[in-house]
Image (spheres, rainbow, N blue to C red):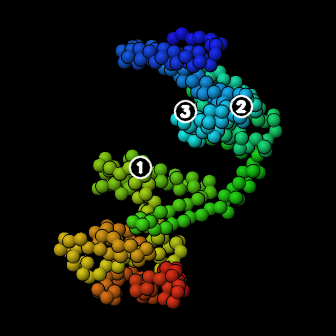
Amino acid sequence: MSTATVTATPSSTATAIQQLTSEAAQVFDAAFDDFTSCSTGDRFATLNAMTEFALQHQAHLARFAQVLEHAGSILSSVAKDLQYSSTANLLQHEVGFAKGQADAYVRLGKLLEHREYPVLAEAIEAGTVSSQQAIIIVREFDRQRDRFDAEFLAMADRSAVAFAEGSDSSQPWSPEDLRDSIRGWFDQHDPEQVELRTEQQHSRRSCKAWVQEDGMVTVITLLTATDGAAVMQFLDANASPRTRLSAPDGDPEIDMRTREQKMADAFVRAFTTAAKSKHTSTQGGAAPTLLVTVPMSEINKHANGTPALARVSRTQEFVPVAEVSRIICDGAVQAAITDDSGNVLKLGRSQRLFSPSQRKALNVAYPTCATDGCTIPSVWENG
């Protein structure tokens, strides 16, 4: 592939770039055609050449963002000369970047202009680090730089680039590994900040749940780093390819659930298990138990093989009786059989004291507080 030094007018520059692109495409086509039949050594050579080309391409894009942002212009920027609202907006429309990616390349362009992290800037220009590696490094440095002195930032700059580039004895680090390591460097250098952040996380923890239009429930939680890691550890363990939790016949080989579905099942199992624990909070003197109301007429329909419905007390959503049959075995769900007027005929699976059972029956009859104008769920009343 030939290269050319372009010193002519902009129109000839554009022509030279187009010619270079065409020549590169021809080289790549030939390399890809040969790849299936060439030796392992040749494949490694092609891989290394492709990697170098890709890194150089990313370096050119970063320098292009620098030029767009800082070249002389009639208006405030070259992008506005070309009738774009900003350099990032130009990159979105002309290169096809997502907004976040366009903003990140603009930031790399500014780095090349101002050299805040000089070792990283040189590595970008040399094409020895990828744009994604550089974006992660800049992002993490920008978040922390005001709290650290120049000597520490210079050390971090050198170290991050060294790990990003790799060496003869180690592979280049992925953007995720770089992110985690850089955060670790800053945290170890300022442990007091870690303590402050943990206190702030504890005060920000939250959990929200609401019913969607179709009756499904959305749960959003914000957990501290430690609690969140513990939850993720539990979900990971129960979402592995070999997990038997809720697998058909306990056999993971015929389990067709996605990873997200396995995590959802594990999430529910954790709550149903906790509901039966003696350490959980109680409602009305009993463990928190979901009541499902099933009219006798619906039971008869189900017995005859026709669609039948039950109602979930907490959300007042209708669900199939067959679904109730599936979840009733968890022990955290109790069925209340009623007549067509709503009178409780039988409270299934009752192994509680008399008063808690009475309260459950009342919760069926009065899903919300009996006081006029009060709409809080009756299960909140613990007295």
| Type of the residue with mark 2 | Ile
**Camera-side residue: 100 or 73?**
73
Q: Dot 1 corresponds to which residue? A: 259
Q: Could you say whether the residue bearing mark 2 is in a helix, strand or loop? A: loop
* Residue drawn 73% across the image and 43% down it: 144
| Type of the residue with mark 3 | Glu
Q: Dot 2 corresponds to which residue? A: 74
User: Which badge, 1 or 3, is on the more N-terminal residue?
Assistant: 3
| Type of the residue with mark 1 | Arg
User: Which badge, 2 or 3, is on the more N-terminal residue?
Assistant: 2
Q: Could you say whether the residue bearing mark 1 is in a helix, strand or loop? A: helix
Occupied quadrant, residue 79: top right
- Please indicate, yes or no, whether residue 158 appears anywhere in the rendered image: no
**Camera-side residue: 167 or 142?**
142
Label 2 – label 3 distance at C-alpha: 21 Å
Mark 1 or mark 2, whichever is nearer to me:
2
- Is residue 371 shown above or below 350? below
Mark 2 neighbour density, 10 Å: few (under 14) some (14–19) many (20 or more) = few
User: Image quadrant for the C terminus?
Assistant: bottom right
Q: Dot 3 corresponds to which residue? A: 94
Mark 1 or mark 3, whichever is nearer to me:
3
